[in-house]
Amino acid sequence: MVEFSAMRQIGLAMCIACSLLLVGLPAWALEFTADQVTKIDGKSHKAVIYYRDQMWRIEHHSMGPVNVSIVRKDKQVVWLLLSRMKHFKTMPYGPEQDLRVSERLEGEVSRQEIGTEVREGHPTILYEVTTKQGELVEVYYQWVATDMHFPMKLAKKDGSWIVEYQHVKLRSVSDYLFNLPLNFQPLEDFQKQAAPEPVAPGM
């Protein structure tokens, strides 16, 4: 009887310890892949997104030199990959680079439900959301998929800025997508090598 009581106490202690460990963990870490379509002043930009909390990878569908951006919020850096040259450029992270993929917007002060619709098979609720950052007040329309708790579309009320996510899949994303390729070199090193040697006066 004493042995059984002691075992119960040990089991209870282990349960309490596990509960304390879980308190500090997030209830749900967001991981997904999706196609992103951004429209700014009528011009469209397409990209593929690989996302995990605190880090995301953007594969751009554009003709520019940078075809991949890796944002590491956890390290406070952004890596711009120039794949054709096998070089990368490091930039400081800024909050303006955040993807707005949470249900609640930064600086949100009010939210009003407008209606419902189905987007790509997902039931969504359309909200009108007002945010305030300092003196700047902005109003958005936000479509939130109720089955995924994910914002499928976000648009400024005046239509000047729209971001939409298509083919959203909530799934695990591999670590290697958020790390620098091993064979890529810093662009700064390439620029130093390419710079001409200074010529002494009179030569």
Image (tube, rainbow, N blue to C red):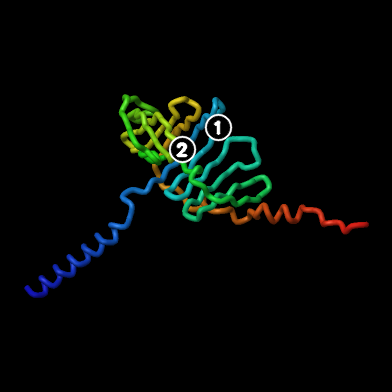
Which callout, 2 or 1, points to the residue nearer the camera?
1
46 is higher (above) or lower (below) than 84: above
- Dot 1: what SS? strand
Place of residue 173 in the rendered image (x, y in percent of width and height, measured from the top left): 45, 48
**Label of residue 45 in the image:** 1
**Label of residue 102 in the image:** none
- Residue type at numbered disc 1: His
Front position in the image: 2 or 74: 74
Q: Residue at x 64, y 35 (%)?
A: 63
Front position in the image: 130 or 175: 130
Q: Residues within 10 Å of mark 1 (few under 14, many from 20)?
A: some
Furthest toward the front, the residue is 135
Place of residue 135 in the rendered image (x, y in percent of width and height, measured from the top left): 44, 37
Q: Would residue 75 appear left or right of 1 to someone viewing this image? A: right
140 is higher (above) or lower (below) than 199: above
Place of residue 119 in the rendered image (x, y in percent of width and height, measured from the top left): 38, 27
- Residue type at numbered disc 2: Ala
> Distance of mark 2 from mark 1, alpha carbons?
14 Å
Quadrant of the image containing the C terminus: bottom right
**Label of residue 34 in the image:** 2
Q: Residue at x 32, y 25 (%)?
A: 114
Front position in the image: 134 or 166: 134
Q: Residues within 10 Å of mark 2 (few under 14, many from 20)?
A: some
